[in-house]
Amino acid sequence: MHDPGEVKITIGPQHPALKEPESFLLSLHGEKITASSVRLGYNHRGIEKACEDRTYVQDLYLVERVCGICSHSHSTCFVQAVEEIAGIEIPARASYLRTLISELERIHSHLLWLGVAGHEIGFDTLLMYTWRDREAVMDVLAAITGNRVNYGMNTIGGVRRDITPQHKEMVLKAIDILEERTKYYIELGLGESTLLKRLSGVGKLTNEDVVRLGAVGPTARASGWGRDVRKDDPYAAYAHLDFKVITNDQCDVYGRTLVRLGELMEAYSMVRQILQKMPDGPIAVKAPRKIPAGEAVSRYEAPRGEDFHYVRSNGTDKPDRVKVRAPTLANVQAVSKMLEGGYLADMSIVVAAIDPCFSCTDRLISVCDEDTQKKNTVSWESIRLKGIDWYKNQGIDFTYLNKKLARKF
Amino acid sequence: MRKPGKIAGQLIQSIFKKPATLNYPAERSGMPEGFRGKLKFNPEKCIGCKMCMRDCPTGAIEIVKVGEKKFEAKIDLGKCIYCGQCVDSCMKEALGITSEFELAKLNPDDLKITFNAENTSDSQK
């Protein structure tokens, strides 16, 4: 039955609180959200298809650009899958270097998130401080890899750059500063009553819902679900490192904040261990240009959760299929659940709490018929024929050129 | 008992500190060594194998033969993503990377640069 007090509002695709285009349809009863649905698909870039037209070496840089924040995550995840198909064993030093960049990336991503979360709850002072501190780790990354984001560190068979003793010193110095700052933020998180009151009880997600909806990363760990690919299925050098999986039973945005702060402290200790244990030796092995036919699945714990890549090769220098599942896609169903029962004003912080990356997530556009609400799958060939027809109606005919091209190949 | 305003002490301290930001472009921090900026090309070392063209993810680089064992490189800085893969692919170290990054131009054609025997480092056409 239709509820007379119900109001439906659409937030997005363009909305000042959300930095990326996505749309939320919220049903409100007064100020309370009774139902919500998320709609993605505004930022489809066709990366998976583009990967099929490029060689593995070129794909490294394309895949890296799936996400601007966790670029190393996607690139490592992809390269791990390719190495598995080709049967390449990377040198120990290369795996330690990958792990080092991955942990430094986690530090920068979590500090960035802390600032964004502060901004969403109107605590802009926190945003200014965390982003200032984040510069320390950005400078380190720029010095080691040659760029602040999109590090370009990976290559098939290892890494592209080695670190020098000066770099080591620089990393340790930055880590010392950041550790002290993070301790202060933890103290602030535990002691500042405005933060606690604003964040606790907001965006509730129970442990059962995490399992049912398949949430990953800090979102899942803040609901007491201690899943972490680094521990469960160690890749790179994680098997040799000593670290804890941070969990929390708060099940709300406050818990997610504490989990991320805890992970920052773990990341600092991990970076120190990596620098201490890193063996000497080569940083890359020579990889063939043509990858033998096969398929592989690779998992990686990105700062936002489990990243997943599937690569199928056909024996040429270009992949046959690349599938990317960014962590946000796994978490986006949980957002719907978290919003229900909450207030409209909490919406932006609840969405921000999963550290969303909607552009990374978009892999598909679905167009719905307005009258019949029907969707159907369109094949590549039919899109092509439709395009030819459309141009013909416009008075542009490529039939002659097509025939000429067909003769040429 | 938790009280609000825990960050206040930090705020007061910051009043007496100088800003964390730089007054760019008057002040510059400089790029670290090994920063991936604009490319450089040494035509004397180039053997025209075109491995850089094959590996470039965006097709930003083109090696053209201009004479007997003479090559020039055309680089479109608008297409270049500064990954430095061409430098890695080059077997003769003809390509290199500089830390120059302030490359914005008002005219897109100014982004297309050619390196040849006459202009080895910083020629823009």
Image (cartoon, rainbow, N blue to C red):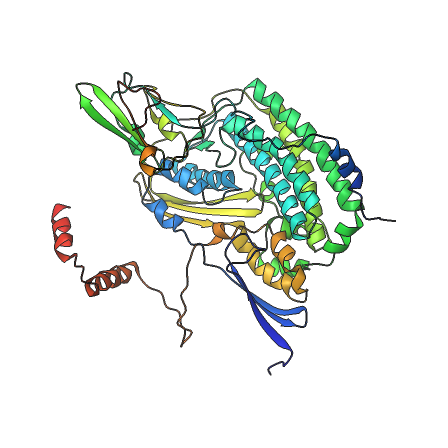
Q: Left or right: A302 with respect to B1?
A: left
Find residue B88 and report its horizontal and vertical position in percent: 38, 26
Q: Nearer the viewer, residue A159 or A258?
A: A258
Q: Is residue B12 visible?
A: yes
- Say above or below: A161 vs A51: above
How many marks on residues?
0
- Say above or below: A198 vs A316: below
Q: Left or right: B124 with respect to A14?
A: left
Q: Left or right: A394 with respect to A8?
A: left
Find residue A365 and report its horizontal and vertical position in percent: 41, 60
Quadrant in the picture for residue A246:
top right
Quadrant in the picture for residue B68:
top left
Q: Nearer the viewer, residue A318 or A66?
A: A66
Q: Nearer the viewer, residue B28 or A179?
A: B28
For the C terminus of chain B, the image quarter is top left
Q: Residue furthest right?
A: B1
Q: Residue furthest top?
A: B44
Find residue A340 and report its horizontal and vertical position in percent: 64, 66
Find residue A35 and report its horizontal and vertical position in percent: 61, 69
- Say above or below: A309 vs A381: above
Q: Nearer the viewer, residue A203 or A273?
A: A203
- Say above or below: A49 vs A284: below
Q: Is residue A289 visible?
A: no
Name the residue at 61% across, 28% down: A274
